[in-house]
Image: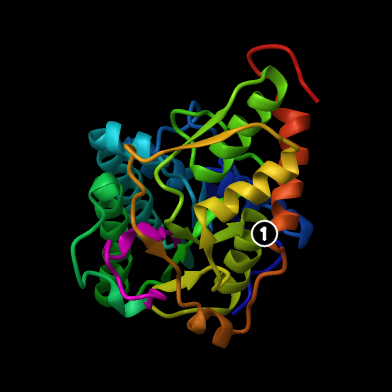
Amino acid sequence: MPMEKNARIYVAGHRGLVGSAIVRRLRAEGYSDIILRTSAELDLTRQADVERFFEQERPEYVFLAAAKVGGILANNTYRADFIYRNLMIQCSVIHSAFRCGVRKLLFLGSSCIYPRLCPQPMKEEYLLSGPLEPTNEPYAVAKIAGIKMCQAYNSQYGTHYISLMPTNLYGTNDNFDLETSHVLPAMMRKFHDAKAHGGPVVLWGTGSARREFLHVDDLADAAVFLMDSYDSSEIINVGTGTDQTIRELAEIVRNTVGYEGEVIWDSTKPDGTPVKLLDVSRLRDAGWSPGIGLAEGIRKTYEWFLENEAGRGGEIFL
């Protein structure tokens, strides 16, 4: 059953890449009672505070987009932070939603939940069928726990909690910090800075790994669509169903930025999982498909970057 336009909707993590996109989508569709809290206003790792918030605000629907996220470097460096913070956020929000009778909750997982050497494309049933990618195992384990928690509450208490597994995301409000960002925004920052200051661009790995990318506005569209129409405890992949090598991605970003210098691939650094492509048959059967192509999405993202991020920490180079 679709959400009513006047329903009380809590978006956890509304200032992040995913949460901000969901808020934009909800507002565009006419939802007027959206509940938001910054991390300074509500620490989602503190269960007592989260329970008090739910008792006071009584949301009817919850989009759980709050999480600690990052690329290979951040995941591998801050392993304890990634598992602790994500587990605590999930436990606090999901249990509080249950206690306060939330009508439906949407949990955002990650394609990292699938085994490192998973058959391609990755079907939902491949979850827990093999070892995880070591560099992001703590994050993946936390996300798997969130999935299983939603399924367990549905089974024991008859709740309506759904779990979406998005592929690699990018777009408006992305993180462009070179130490904590994902591959696409990190590339964009490197190419932009090299174009502005000169020098080569050094990229991690061999460039042979294959990845799938989805614009965050498409994910937000899918999230609202599935909140309205999907009611299964089974996880559902959200992606494009197409991929490219990291080298191919680098060429698109390089051309978008207009960088003409040298690119060096540092093969001493890890590539991560060799291939990550989601099987999106279940999503397409549900009636949804993406609308933003990769080249178009990268162009939009770079335009946003130039307006909002390019000059942070120094002179603006356009």
**Which is nearer the eye, 137 or 234?**
137
Region of the chain picked out in magenta, as a range: 107-123
**Which is nearer the eye, 82 or 176?**
176
| Residue on which the image places disc 1 | 294
- Res. 135 image quadrant: top left
What residue sits 36% from the left and 35% below the top? 73
- Res. 254 image quadrant: top right
What residue sits 55% from the left and 88% below the top? 285
What residue sits 41% from the left and 64% below the top? 276
- Res. 204 image quadrant: top left
Q: Is residue 103 magenta?
A: no
Q: Is residue 171 in view?
A: no
Q: What percent of the width, then of the height, locates residue 33?
A: 68, 52
Query: Would residue 265 be found to the left or right of residue 290 on screen?
Result: left
Q: What percent of the width, then of the height, locates residue 76?
A: 28, 37
Q: Is residue 121 magenta?
A: yes
* Secondary element type, mark 1: helix
Q: Is residue 253 in view?
A: yes
What residue sits 42% from the left and 42% below the top? 69
Quarter of the figure that contains the N terminus: bottom right
Given the current orientation, which residue lies at the most extreme bottom position?
285
Q: What percent of the width, then of the height, locates residue 194?
A: 64, 25
Quarter of the figure that contains the C terminus: top right
Q: Main secondary structure of the magenta part?
A: loop
